[in-house]
Image (tube, rainbow, N blue to C red):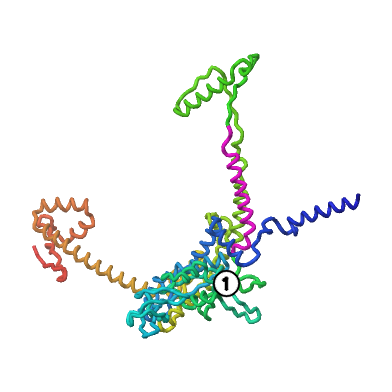
């Protein structure tokens, strides 16, 4: 008996271990990806399907990008490279670059420089652009009729770089098609590309889309059924830092720590879906209602078949006319089953899980919904700013690498390129302090204005120009005012006393400032002068105003 009990206990323990091998495990842990390529697929799937994961990662990728700064005094070269960055969509590429970095934990980027592919006749040596000749692919070799010797032959392939900026493209490589050979002793990495099935089919079928622009090192790898190795320094690997482990050559996705929380979220979502399907629409049924008192129930003495037909007829009339009012000779009862879905919803649990996912992705709870308070948000923003600055440094490293590659391709001097300084928080207190130091002469205008991304030299030139414009406008207004005053004085002096007094009285009421200016300059008539007062002369107008003196 004891042996049987021990056997059953052991079997029960084994069954429990089959589901939970460790007390630290849960159901989601049993389905975690067991290799790095499988992890890439799961992380990509959740980025595409989970709204919080997608939006958080997109914000992390987009937010810290600022304008490009090229360190050169040559304006022509500066404008040239800024135009190249605009044409190749460098800003948008840095966002895509960061999306791969956060989703996969790895970003593989390179630059495709344009080239022209020529086919050379093996018989006469004539070379023709591949786009200008008819050819077919046999055993990975182009064959056709030479335009010069008019004989059917095999062609040699010769690629010539074009040497211009048209056709330069930035591209990222799918990590699922990349393999890394890593020496954990020296830290050296060798990168290999496994062509996808679409590329293989295009090359094997002789599609012009692939044969006219695919580099020969990829075609040779497909021909030999091997992986294609990248040349040293021709691919940029951006790996997200993590702890040292057996897969140290790969970066780890930012989604990896929240995979189980996402699984839990979708478990709640499936429960929510089941509740909505099963409980949100109630089942309604009608029945002959029992009347109160000692009245005999309807279903004892009435034909329930006729009752049912009458009810169905009334329902049809109501469906045809929603305003129809039914009058029944007997009471009808109604009851429902279900319809309590709202009380069973798990929205609070889903919201709490989403908050955990936000925190796991490095985003404070409520940040995406604008629920961060000012007092607590300042510290949070500072922490996020430090994280963004680290990411920006790595993106600037790629920006400089890409610029060096383009300079080598164009055979120009190398330039130093970076992005403008990134400031996430407003730093109001710091700016007030800088303003005080600038007012007291302890801080230069250039240093102070640089905090606002402004140039002290340009601002000084603008101030001087505005001052000159204001002075010119002031002189223009002064001249016009002098002409107006002189016109008033001349007209008033030519009027008789009664008319002049009437106009001056009205001017004093409506234009007191003009009256105060003109009144002292008007010649008084003899009747208004005191015996010892000499006649008032009109003032002499300045020559530049165009005036002339006139004594009355």
Q: Residue furthest right?
A: 1
Height in image: 152 above or below 312? below
Residue 365 locus on image (x, y percent) = 58, 56
Q: Residue furthest front?
A: 151
Left or right placement of residue 255 versus residue 549 in this view: right
Residue 264 locus on image (x, y percent) = 64, 53
Residue 395 locus on image (x, y percent) = 51, 72
Extent of the magenta region? 254-283
Instruction: Using the rendered image of the protein, determine whether residue 333 is visible from the camera's viewpoint.
Output: yes
Height in image: 520 above or below 331? below
Q: Residues within 10 Å of mark 1 (few under 14, many from 20)?
A: many
Instruction: Using the rendered image of the protein, determine whether residue 428 is visible from the camera's viewpoint.
Output: no
In magenta segment, residue 551: no
The quarter of the picture where residue 374 lies is: bottom right
Height in image: 181 above or below 319? below
The quarter of the picture where residue 13 lies is: bottom right
What secondary structure is the stretch in magenta mostly built from? Answer: helix
The residue that appears at 45% across and 28% down in the rendered structure is 320
Q: Quadrant of the C terminus?
A: bottom left
Which residue is the site of mark 1? 239
Residue 493 locus on image (x, y percent) = 10, 58
Using the image as rendered, state which of residue 40 and residue 456 is in the foreground: 40
Using the image as rendered, state which of residue 106 and residue 141 is in the foreground: 141
Q: Residue furthest bottom?
A: 124
SS at circle 1: strand
The residue that appears at 60% across and 21% down in the rendered structure is 289
């Amino acid at each position: 008996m004891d042996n049987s009990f021990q056997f059953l206990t052991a079997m029960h323990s084994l069954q429990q271990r089959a589901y939970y091998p460790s007390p630290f495990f849960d159901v989601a842990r049993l389905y975690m990806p067991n290799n790095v390529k499988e992890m890439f697929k799961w992380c990509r799937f959740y980025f595409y399907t989970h709204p919080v994961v997608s939006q958080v990662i997109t914000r992390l990728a987009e937010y810290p990008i600022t304008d490009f700064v090229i360190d050169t005094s040559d304006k022509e070269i500066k404008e040239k490279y800024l135009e190249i960055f605009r044409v190749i969509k460098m800003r948008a590429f840095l966002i895509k670059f960061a999306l791969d970095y956060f989703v996969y934990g790895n970003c593989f980027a390179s630059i495709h420089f344009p080239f022209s592919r020529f086919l050379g006749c093996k018989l006469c040596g004539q070379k023709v652009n591949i786009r200008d000749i008819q050819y077919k692919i046999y055993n990975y070799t182009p064959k056709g009729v030479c335009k010069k010797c008019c004989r059917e032959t095999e062609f040699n392939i010769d690629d010539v770089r074009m040497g211009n900026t048209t056709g330069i493209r930035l591209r990222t490589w799918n990590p699922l098609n990349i393999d890394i050979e890593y020496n954990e002793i020296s830290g050296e990495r060798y990168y290999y590309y496994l062509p996808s099935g679409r590329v293989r089919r295009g090359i094997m079928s002789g599609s012009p889309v692939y044969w006219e622009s695919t580099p020969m090192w990829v075609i040779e790898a497909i021909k030999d059924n091997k992986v294609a190795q990248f040349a040293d320094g021709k691919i940029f690997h951006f790996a997200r830092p993590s702890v040292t482990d057996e897969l140290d050559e790969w970066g780890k996705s930012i989604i990896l720590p929240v995979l189980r929380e996402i699984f839990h979220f979708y478990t709640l979502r499936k429960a929510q879906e089941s509740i909505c399907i099963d409980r949100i629409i109630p089942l309604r049924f009608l029945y002959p209602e029992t009347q109160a008192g000692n009245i005999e129930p309807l279903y004892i003495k009435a034909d329930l078949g006729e009752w049912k037909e009458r009810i169905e007829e009334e329902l049809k009339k109501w469906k045809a006319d929603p305003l129809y009012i039914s009058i029944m000779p007997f009471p009808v009862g109604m009851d429902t089953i279900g319809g309590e879905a709202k009380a069973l919803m798990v929205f609070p649990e889903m919201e709490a899980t989403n908050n955990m996912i936000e925190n796991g992705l490095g985003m404070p709870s409520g940040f995406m919904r604008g629920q961060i308070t000012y007092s607590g948000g300042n510290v949070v923003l500072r922490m996020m700013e430090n994280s963004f600055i680290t990411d920006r440094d790595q993106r600037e490293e790629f920006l400089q690498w890409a610029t060096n590659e383009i300079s080598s391709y164009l055979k120009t001097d190398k330039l130093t390129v970076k992005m403008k300084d990134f400031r996430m928080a407003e730093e109001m207190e710091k700016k007030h302090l800088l303003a005080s130091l600038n007012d007291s002469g302890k801080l230069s205008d250039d240093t102070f204005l640089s905090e606002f991304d402004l140039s002290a030299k340009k601002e000084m030139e603008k101030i001087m120009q505005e001052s000159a414009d204001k002075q010119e406008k002031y002189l223009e207004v002064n001249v016009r005012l002098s002409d107006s005053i002189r016109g008033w004085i001349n007209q008033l002096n030519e009027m008789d006393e009664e008319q002049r007094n009437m106009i001056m009285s009205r001017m004093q009421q409506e234009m007191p400032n003009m009256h105060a200016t003109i009144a002292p300059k008007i010649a008084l008539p003899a009747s208004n002068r005191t015996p010892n007062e000499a006649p008032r002369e009109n003032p002499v107008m300045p020559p530049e105003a165009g005036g002339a003196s006139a004594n009355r």
